[in-house]
Amino acid sequence: MAEVFVVGSINQDFVLKVERRPDPGETVTDAVLSTHHGGKGANQAAAAARLGGSVVMLGRVGDDEFGEPQLSNLREWGVDTSLVERLAGWKTGSAFITVTPDGENAITVAPGANRGLTNEDIEAAADTIAVAEVLVAQMEVSPETVRRAAEVAARRRTRVLVNLAPPFEVGRDFLEKPDPLVVNEHEAAFLLGEKVEGTDAALSAASRLLELGSRSAVVTLGASGAVFADRKSSGRLPAPEAQVVDTTGAGDAFVGALAVRLARGDSLEEAVAYAVRAGAAAVAKEGAQGSLPTPEAVEAL
Ligand code: RIB
């Protein structure tokens, strides 16, 4: 029985370290290529397991050369992959990531087998979802599948954490399920239809997300930490100073940490405070899973 059930994407990441991104029609050379295990779902599952959570993942990879290594990698992190299947004839999801010297990333994803996960697969996993404390989902599998997973979890009284990344149009009936909904400033702006920049704007965005139906909301702010709001309280949690090499996956480390702490019974404020430190610890090395922190590393910050 796992505390945290992650439904989501598993990607092969191709990372280009480059001085600057090309403009449309331009060629930039001298980039350095590296490959990493990634996908928001896999990163969040690995982060939660690294922090001591018992984690089961539901996802799909292809039967190409990238599929099996992704499964072995998740197992090495301690994630239960018994619900991850290799789909014949599909390519494993892949992500093409450029990282500039400031550590910022830009990502293009080819979902591949991630989109082969179906509503029937979710229903087949309903009993495992029911015994988990927290269901975690992001938006790199098809939105209908995330919707079904949230419905199953709500029906079986498992807490739902949705990281709306990348952002999708979702209705009030969907937004009523997550507790919390986790978004960054761009995703909050997408949902609210207005700019969200800085801590004050993020705090008011979190309250507005509650008006849209969400039971609680967290807005992440990168180096500035995060804000949260639920029906009883709201607040801001600053991040500790961090040496930035690559911010890819820092949001996933945040979500994985948040899930583990909520599963263990922390209040939303306590869990966000912990997750902010986990996110800060995850930017020190290249690759989304390259610097996932241990509980000791988080405590040390
Ligand atoms: O959040 C980072 C992740 O986004 C990368 O690992 C990449 O696979 C994309 O899904």
Image (cartoon, rainbow, N blue to C red):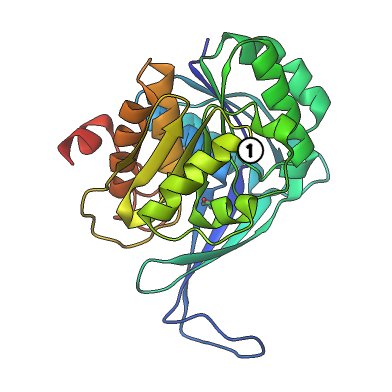
In this rendered view, identify the residue nearer to me: 32 or 119: 119
Q: How many marks?
A: 1
Determine which quarter of the picture holds residue 7. Answer: top right
Up the image or down, 52 lies above or below 245; here it is: above
Q: Which residue is mark 1?
A: 212
* Mark 1 C-beta closer than 8 Å to ligand 1: no
Up the image or down, 71 lies above or below 38; here it is: above
Determine which quarter of the picture holds residue 48. Answer: top left
List x then y, in percent, for residue 177.
Answer: 64, 26
Residue placed at 65% from the left, 43% from the top?
Answer: 139
Q: Is residue 152 visible?
A: yes
Question: In the visual, does 84 lie left or right of 179?
Answer: right
- Element type at mark 1: loop
Query: Local crowd at mark 1 within 10 Å, few (<14), some, or many (≥20)?
Result: some
Residue placed at 29% from the left, 42% from the top?
Answer: 237
Up the image or down, 81 lies above or below 190; here it is: above
Residue placed at 40% from the left, 49% from the top?
Answer: 250
Determine which quarter of the picture holds residue 262. Answer: top left
Quadrant into which the C terminus falls: top left
Q: Amino acid at mark 1?
A: Leu
Residue placed at 63% from the left, 16% from the top?
Answer: 129
List x then y, in percent, for residue 27.
Answer: 59, 89
List x then y, in percent, for residue 89.
Answer: 83, 45
Q: Is residue 43 visible?
A: no
